[in-house]
Image (cartoon, helix red, strand yellow):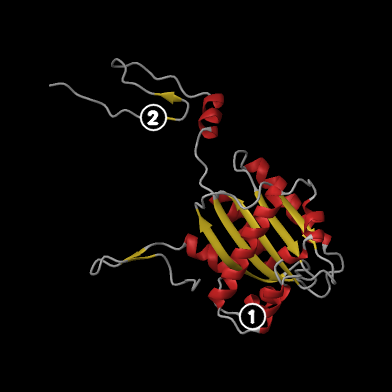
Amino acid sequence: MTSSRKVQNFPGRSWRDGEAGEEESPLTMFEVYQGRSREKIVLQRLIVIARLPHRLADRTELGAHYERLNFHLSKQYTFDHITGLLLIYPSVLLHVIESSRDVLLSVLKDLKDLQQETDCALLEAPKVVFMAHNPESRLFQQWSYKVLNVDQKPGDAEAKEQEEEEDSTETLVCTVLSALQKLGEHLETSKKADRGSVLDETPGLVISQAVLEKLLARADFLTPQEHLQMYDSPLNISMDCGQVIRSSFHTTV
């Protein structure tokens, strides 16, 4: 009889059957590094909103916090390019971040840790508005943040009309997604390197703060802690009907 061994493939090298008793040489760190660089990063997009505490005197502290976090994550996940936009309004924030699943979960864990601090001075009541898995392309080509002035209001008449209407949660989310799509396209075609100046010159592209405040008032969204719980919870498999339930948490959007 002839015996066969299962062939194993590892990043950076193909392992083949050898003669009996022959030892395979181990992978080098360089080969592991090269193999990791060739792995396909599955893009995901996370959109988070939160309130700003009244005691937050300097809103640039939020931007500095996320700059430090992104720098740390870029070192930890070398090949997971981070892009997005953080808009810091007078009373709320909107954060769009695009990267791998590991990076986005790290951002959610940071939000959870901020909430568990005795005196959270940066933000309050964060909620996950939307998470896209494997979108066709990125909305933004880099990450940056913008502190919006008190008198910097959207100039779009349609946005003002929507502020006065009592829209459904789905409508409000679609409004945010549509506005972000237009904003991303405009920033990509703009010849200016300073994205902050682009927003100053085109206030109609800025999502209304009133829309974000309406979303924060809805109970349809998961908190970062609940979202992480959903990821970490075991699968509940029903043998009778063949259904697989991730967890008791769910989103309506």
Q: Classify 115 as above or below 162.
A: above
Task: From the image, state whether disc 1 or disc 2 is nearer to you.
Answer: 1
- Please tell me which of labels 1 and 2 falls first in the chain: 2
Circle 1 sits on which residue?
Answer: 217
Quadrant where the N terminus sits is top left
Location of residue 197 (image quadrant) = bottom right
Depth check: give the residue in front, 166 or 56. 166
Q: Residue 122 in the image: x percent, y percent?
A: 77, 66
Residue 63: x and y in percent read: 78, 57
In the picture of the structure, the residue carrying the numbered disc 2 is 9
Q: Secondary structure at mark 1?
A: helix
Q: Nearer the viewer, residue 52 or 153?
A: 153
Residue 109 location, quadrant: bottom right
The one nearer the camera, 26 or 75, is 75
Looking at the rendering, which quadrant does residue 146 occupy? bottom right
Residue 152 is left or right of residue 219, and the answer is right
Residue at horizontal 74%, vertical 62%? 87
Where is residue 99 shown, x and y percent of the image? 59, 49
Asked if residue 138 shows in the view, the reply is yes
Mark 2: few/some/many CA within 10 Å (<14, 14-19, 20+): few
Residue at the image point whose x is 51% and y is 33% from the top = 38
Q: Is residue 110 visible?
A: no
